[in-house]
Image: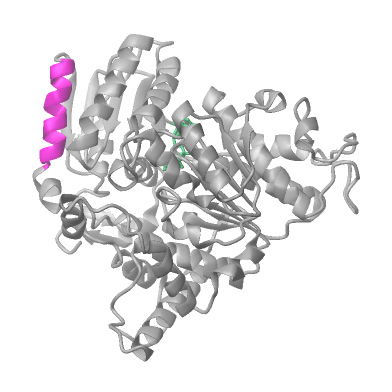
Amino acid sequence: MAGTMKDPTYADAIERLNSTQSGFSVLEARRKAGKKLDASAKQQMREWVSRVGYQATDFDALNVVHVAGTKGKGTTCAFVNGMLSSCQKSFGKPKKIGLYTSPHLVSVRERIRINSQPVSEELFTKYFFEVWEALESEAIRKGEDPAVKPVYFRTLTLLSFHIFMREQVDVAVYEVGVGGELDSTNILVHPAVTGITTLGIDHVESLGDTIDKIAWHKAGIFKNGSPAFSVHQLVEAEQVLLERAKEKDVQLQWVDVIPAVRKANLTPAEDFQFKNASLAVRLTLEILKRFNIRFDEKPEGSSDSEYCSTTQTWLPDASEIFLQLPNELLYGLEGVVWRARCEEKIVGSHHYYLDGAHTVDSLEVASDWFGKKASTRQAPKILVFNQQSHRDAANLMKTIFSTLRDNWKVKFDHVIFCTNMTYTGNKWKLDFVNNNADPEALNTLSLQRSLCDEWLALDPAANALVSPTIEDAVNVMRGIGGEIDHVDIFVTGSFHLVGGILSILEGQEYGLQSTTSLASG
Ligand SMILES: Nc1ncnc2c1ncn2[C@@H]1O[C@H](COP(=O)(O)OP(=O)(O)OP(=O)(O)O)[C@@H](O)[C@H]1O
């Protein structure tokens, strides 16, 4: 459908965006055919970009920080964003900081931020339709079907480039979607700096099932002429990263936890977080060089606010930053709140511990975090878990069970297996519509039922049940606890679940009007 819409709304934009999801049957066919990522993906992405009026080299102007990895990408990007924002307050530069991350929790707009704020509905809608209409008219001009569009993540990446260029962002922090080499963000030609967070096993269907294959993909973001950093990895992964760096003539620098970062008050104060933050510091220093930011000068026009590093007398050089961080960087790190990652939320007597972890490694970390907190008191314990495929789910569930039993002697009194459907009556919140989920499994709850049985085999004493929607699960929890003044609730397994719970708990009424039913989804 080509042509310009009259007064399109945000909901119109999201509906069109949702229409670019591949859909369960297409994904299933690809899975069955054993299809991996498309080798021509970058070329296709360059083509979409050119249809919207850009060359990939135009994005050099965005001074991009490009981050890949299995775990900690989003958090590392948030830390870089936090430190740059803090520098912006002190030094007035960078002027506009873009941040592109995934997935979203409550609104799609969270994926594209400027100066830490999700782009407004108005801007999102305006720029979305500029991109959409450019794609359609170019397709018509070339005699192609205008209904053919880039898939969901590519559309959002395209939109992020367009928004950041049009809004004249002067630094953009980009989290890779999947892998690196063939990711749609990887058309970047000269990023300012690249970083690799902790590697582990995830997305094995597209990236491969061993750490070296995965490392090969992640190292695809290294670019000749752009400094590259990585946290330390398993030996096989380090070897591959080094080979790939050599092949591209990139000098890869390893990042250890910086002692000064270890002193920062981070949330959560876990080893992995200090790793993420240390990498973020090294990435940020590269950007500061580009903006000629020095911590040895009192910024013009600034007061002696807490943000001014008036006592620092050195340049932000990596070798000297080890013992003391400039205040801008310290406060930038400490101020980061990256939701749904080890997030605590109290609603009356219910203490929610929310973490979107969905790999074995990160579920171990998240379960340890919950165990440490919840093992300190006698209180009813509830687990709410969601996964969309049995292949991974059973393993992940066992990870939660054994980590909590073995390390913390914590058991759940109630376990709720729910889908990622948002509202009772089989309604999605518009921003959460997931056409990639198996509609049959959603209707029959077959996956949730089998997980429930498997949990009962692990712990026959648990009160385990299946919930058709996230809202139903919240309603069940509201009925647990009664007069008891403390209930510990661990919500994990998917960001869709955590985002849905947060939307419901925080009464995101907007979503209530913007729903779509399972039948029409
Ligand atoms: N360096 C790390 N090592 C292991 N686990 C981590 C690390 N950093 C974060 N995590 C865990 O992974 C969860 C997700 O973190 P984050 O969103 O930063 O990772 P991500 O790489 O963006 O993941 P995803 O691809 O799932 O979005 C965190 O809540 C935490 O439990």
Q: Quadrant of ligand 1?
A: top left
Q: Which residues are magenta?
A: 445-459
- Viewer-proximal residue, 306 or 369? 369
Residue 18 position in % (x across, y down): 31, 64
> Does residue 198 show up?
no
Indicate whether 435 appears above or below 366: below
The quarter of the picture where the N terminus appears is: bottom left
Indicate whether 56 appears above or below 402: below
Residue 405 position in % (x across, y down): 31, 12
The quarter of the picture where the C terminus appears is: bottom left
Indicate whether 338 appears above or below 65: above
Whether residue 202 is in magenta: the answer is no
Residue drawn at the location 40% of the way across and 77% of the way down: 132
Instruction: Considering the whole magenta stretch, tell me its main secondary structure.
Output: helix
Residue drawn at the location 65% of the way across and 43% of the way down: 283
> Does residue 143 show up?
yes
Residue drawn at the location 46% of the way across and 67% of the way down: 158
Residue 394 position in % (x across, y down): 21, 29
Judge left or right: residue 442 versus residue 207. left
Residue 171 position in % (x across, y down): 66, 58
Judge left or right: residue 29 versus residue 132. left
